[in-house]
Image (tube, rainbow, N blue to C red):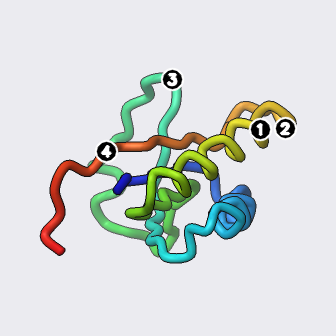
Amino acid sequence: MKFFIVTCIKENQEIVQKILSKANINVYSSTDIIGYKNNQQPNLLEEWFAAGDEQCDSSMIFSFTTDENATQAFNQIIAYNNENPNDFPIRAFIVPVEKASF
């Protein structure tokens, strides 16, 4: 079993979902994340009292899946990034799962 993790900007979320589907990864979770670049530190005090504007510009999608499915999705993400170079590539990680409670 592998823990497959993908991070991407919101605009690429549908692309990632299509890649997961092609790789037979049909069960996954996602969460919104805020990404920072160039070591810029956010001023957390400014964000302490929300003004109603949510700043979620990225997504993290993750799944527990087979080695074969994770490798297939990983390779498709590499191919997508090579064919569509930009400042915000889709990033993928395969993490081995040593033990599980099920």
Under mark 1, the amino acid is: Ala
**Of pointers 4 and 2, the one earlier in the residue sequence:** 2
Residue sitting nearer the eye, 23 or 42: 23
Residue at coordinates 44% horizontally, 28% vertically from top-left?
40
Point out residue 41 in the picture as x, y percentages from the top left corner: 37, 32
Which residue is outermost to the right? Answer: 83
In the rendered structure, find residue 79 and report the number of the disc placed on it: 1
Which residue is drawn at the image coordinates 34% and 41% (left, top)?
43
Q: How far apart are marks 1 and 4 (CA)?
A: 22 Å
Q: Where is residue 53 in the image (x, y as percent from the top left)?
A: 52, 69
The Cα atoms of the two marked residues, 1 and 2, are separated by 9 Å
Decide which of 52, 55 is in the foreground and name it: 55
The label shown at residue 96 is 4
**Which-is-in-front pick, marks 1 and 2?**
1
Tell me the mark number nearer the camera, choosing from 4 and 2: 4
**Which badge, 3 or 4, comes first in the chain's sequence?**
3
Read off the residue under disc 3.
38
